[in-house]
């Protein structure tokens, strides 16, 4: 009956108003960046761009997309995402499953868990990491972007806690049927762990797609840059471009762009794949994140 009271209706209206305001506050910066990416450099420098493009132009996108290296970098990022997410998922599941067992079933569980947690707090540093990749012969290869981060510890903790929250009776029933650890993991744990798997998949996908610094370090040739690294290098070129050997077409194009318009363009070029994939994982994301983090 309380759903029909005046106080309850006012409460619902108040919630909708507050949530709408918060949604608009989150949306306005994105719309502003989109408007900047479609505006001329003069309008952006004058500060006249708000939520609608001024002197509409596609010059920033043209400047980025006309380079053949863009397609190569896009392909490298796709390959990195496919291989990286696959490696991350396999390593995360294989590490989280044994660590989710009780101490009486896996006596060294606490020791291994602390070893993994230690790596979240401390690392060898940039130079030792580079030397390891170099000595392993991975420089200028796709594996230099994947193997150093093959075991994301935060994802392991999420998956570990999710596994620990599953009913023990399911595992006991599989053992009575003669199943081993791999069969139990494959046939019992994974089918009911889709929310957690979708969560760590999204984390790994976004991490690999947006990473640019490792590409700048481990890739010798710009032809092997992933997309994020390529776009970052393009932004630096806009800031330091020389006009000595510039053609008339290049000068006209450069007159329409700036570092801000190019940066806004690269943001949207980078975020489009994530926006296309996220809706399919959204229904699992919140549930997997909450369930995988509340049980210690």
Image: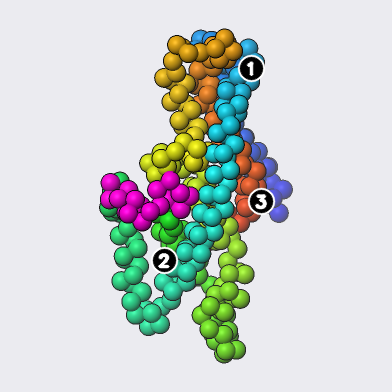
Dot in front, 3 or 2: 3
Among numbered discs 3 and 2, the one appearing first in the sequence = 3
Most common secondary structure along the magenta stretch: helix
Assess disc 2: are there few (<14), some (14-19) or many (≥20) residues with their C-alpha within 10 Å of its C-alpha: few
Please state which of residues 121 and 51 is positioned toward the viewer in this rendering.
121
Q: Which mark is residue 296?
A: 2
Dot in front, 3 or 1: 1
Q: Which mark is residue 289?
A: none
Q: Which mark is residue 280?
A: 3
Pinpoint residue 62: horizontal percent, then vertical percent: 61, 23
Residue that badge 1 annotates:
57
Q: Is label 1 in a helix, a strand or a loop? A: loop
Distance from disc 1 to disc 2, alpha carbons, whole Å, reads: 53 Å
Pinpoint residue 261: horizontal percent, then vertical percent: 53, 21
Which residue is depicted at the point 41% across and 19% down?
Answer: 240
What sort of colour scheme is used for the picture?
Answer: rainbow
Distance from disc 3 to disc 1, alpha carbons, whole Å, reads: 32 Å
Pinpoint residue 86: horizontal percent, then vertical percent: 54, 59
Q: Which residues are magenta?
A: 127-146
Vertically, is 18 above or below 241?
below
Q: Choose top left, top right, bottom left or bottom right for residue 257.
A: top right
Distance from disc 3 to disc 2, alpha carbons, whole Å, reads: 28 Å
Please state which of residues 285 and 137 is positioned toward the viewer in this rendering.
137
């Amino acid at each position: 009956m309380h759903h029909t009271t005046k106080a309850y209706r006012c409460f619902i209206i108040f919630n909708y108003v507050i949530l709408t305001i918060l949604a608009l506050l989150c949306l306005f910066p994105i719309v502003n960046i989109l408007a900047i990416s479609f505006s001329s450099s003069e309008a952006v420098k004058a500060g006249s761009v708000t939520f609608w493009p001024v002197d509409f132009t596609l010059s920033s996108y043209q400047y980025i997309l006309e380079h053949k290296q863009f397609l190569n970098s896009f392909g490298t990022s796709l390959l990195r995402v496919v291989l990286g997410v696959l490696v991350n998922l396999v390593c995360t599941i294989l590490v989280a499953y044994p660590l989710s067992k009780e101490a009486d079933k896996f006596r060294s569980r606490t020791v291994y868990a602390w070893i993994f947690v230690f790596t979240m707090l401390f690392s060898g540093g940039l130079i030792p990491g580079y030397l390891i990749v170099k000595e392993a012969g991975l420089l200028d290869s796709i594996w230099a972007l994947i193997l150093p981060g093959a075991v994301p510890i935060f994802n392991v903790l999420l998956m570990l806690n999710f596994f620990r929250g599953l009913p023990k009776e399911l595992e006991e029933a599989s053992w009575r049927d003669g199943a081993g650890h791999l069969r139990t993991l494959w046939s019992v744990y994974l089918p009911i762990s889709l929310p957690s798997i979708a969560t760590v998949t999204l984390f790994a996908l976004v991490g690999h797609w947006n990473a640019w610094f490792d590409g700048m370090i481990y890739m010798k040739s710009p032809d092997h840059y992933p997309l994020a690294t390529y776009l970052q290098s393009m932004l630096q070129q806009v800031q330091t471009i020389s006009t000595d050997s510039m053609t008339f077409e290049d000068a006209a194009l450069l007159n329409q762009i700036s570092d801000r318009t190019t940066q806004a363009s690269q943001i949207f070029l980078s975020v489009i794949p994530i926006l296309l994939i996220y809706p399919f994982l959204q229904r699992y994301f919140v549930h997997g994140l909450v369930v995988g983090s509340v049980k210690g």
